Image (cartoon, rainbow, N blue to C red):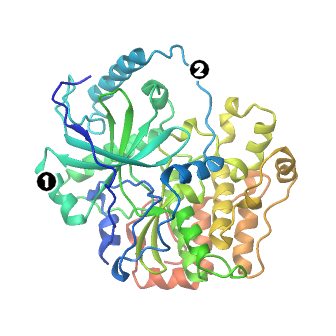
Amino acid sequence: MGNANSRVRHLPDVFCVCMGRSSEARDVAGSAAEDAASSPSPQLPACSASNYVVGEVGSESVEQQIEQSMSHWSHLTQIDSDCIDEEDVEADNMEVFLALQSDPSTKEFFRTFGYDSELWKSSGSLEIGHKFAEGGQAELFHANVTWSNLKGNKRDREHGREWVLKVFKKGTRLRHLQSQWPHGMLKFHEEQVANWRSPTPKTIPRFFCEVFRGTLLEDGRFAFLMKKEHLDLRRLIDDKMKLIAPNNRGPFSKEVAEELMFEIALGMSWLHSRDIVHRDLKASNVLIQVHDDDDFQCFVADYECSIGVVGTGLFRAPEILEACKEKSVSKRLELFTMASDVYSYGMTCYEILTGKFPFNGQSGNDIMDVVIGGKRPEVPEYVDEWVHKLLSDCWQHDPTKRPSFGEIVNFIYSNSLRIRGLIKRGVTYRMDRMDWIKLEGI
């Protein structure tokens, strides 16, 4: 695939940069012109006080971190493959990729690096660094992009923008991945391109991770190019928990926890406004940009192949757990709804508030049965009464009784002095530019 003079190269294993951000980072992240998407980086070098990162670099290797994360990988629907021949998969992937490049609605999104396709010239060179994370479907690599369009290189330098590559594993068929993409994701990219080219482009606050490009590597693997963030929320929680006493009241202050819960609700509200059901919301699928001690911005991530995902462990709603127990979940994808996302959001808030996994990470039919029977995690007494109610509402057994994310956003706004104060001062959220959500009272 491609020509012999490939410009897709592999970086040495030392490609890891301390990603400090200025106080302007939130405004940059909120811009539609920010071409932004994200991927977690589980290992960070120590930073100075001005580039604060919670915790220290773990002594465990990347391989050990991946091994430890396996128990919380997403579960995937099973897709029968009619052929496992890698050459056949590579040829088929190119055929599908060229079809995507020829479609007027998606041609801007699907580009090559290091070689010209039959339809488009290369977008530039792509250097693939070392792997830093892995999931059930794909591996994450540090990446360095040199754009053919010099304006892209200038924007990267000005905004301190770096990249990661989410590479789907060898033998994965692109036509199967295509069936897993939520339609709203590519539709949004089409609208973004039109917005960027408009004489009066809109600035859109961002609480979700925008996937920037889809590309086919020369070895036939498909990959998403995404903007690099500092780390994922689960890693941040773990780092914070190492620094506090065992009897402490969770990893975050009350105010920070409310901000994180609010931003995740905003991100999910935006996804649902685009008819994108996440299916696997949890702290490890929320990415974090660190601005300073206890000053974070979070982005909902890992929804780009959501149609093929059936969730993770006890983050899943009871209606989905019932189907898992009956071994029919892959055939009952209608169970994955906006309401099941709300249930998972409650579990994600539980992680934020306590630092723990739901039910301490237990699994198996016994614990599954008690959850199906109505048991929920025990919320500590130090959590405010209104947050207790929020979690209780999100964890309703009947999906129709769970709130929408628009209602969740308004509920947090109505009860959190911290959030109301930030919004009324015009800090962070720029609610006047969010046409997908309306806060009551402003």
Q: Residue at x 70, y 33 (%)?
A: 332
Can residue 260 be seen in the rendering of this structure? yes
Marks 1 and 2 in Cβ contact (< 8 Å): no
Image quarter where the N terminus lies is: top left
Q: Residue at x 48, y 53 (%)?
A: 62
On the image, numbered disc 2 is attached to which residue? 80
Residue 333 at what x, y percent from top left?
A: 65, 35
On the image, numbered disc 1 is attached to which residue? 151
Residue 177 shows which numbered tag?
A: none
Taking depth in this image into account, of 268 and 308 the one nearest to the observer is 308
Q: Residue at x 46, y 25 (%)?
A: 171
Residue 137 at what x, y percent from top left?
A: 52, 37
Name the quadrant containing residue 249. bottom right
Residue 145 at what x, y percent from top left?
A: 23, 48
Could you say whether the residue bearing mark 2 is in a helix, strand or loop?
Answer: loop
Q: Amino acid at mark 2?
A: Asp
> In this picture, is 275 found above or below 47?
above
> In screen coordinates, is 407 left or right of 230?
right
> In this picture, is 179 found above or below 252?
above
Taking depth in this image into account, of 96 and 89 the one nearest to the observer is 89
Taking depth in this image into account, of 40 and 18 the one nearest to the observer is 18
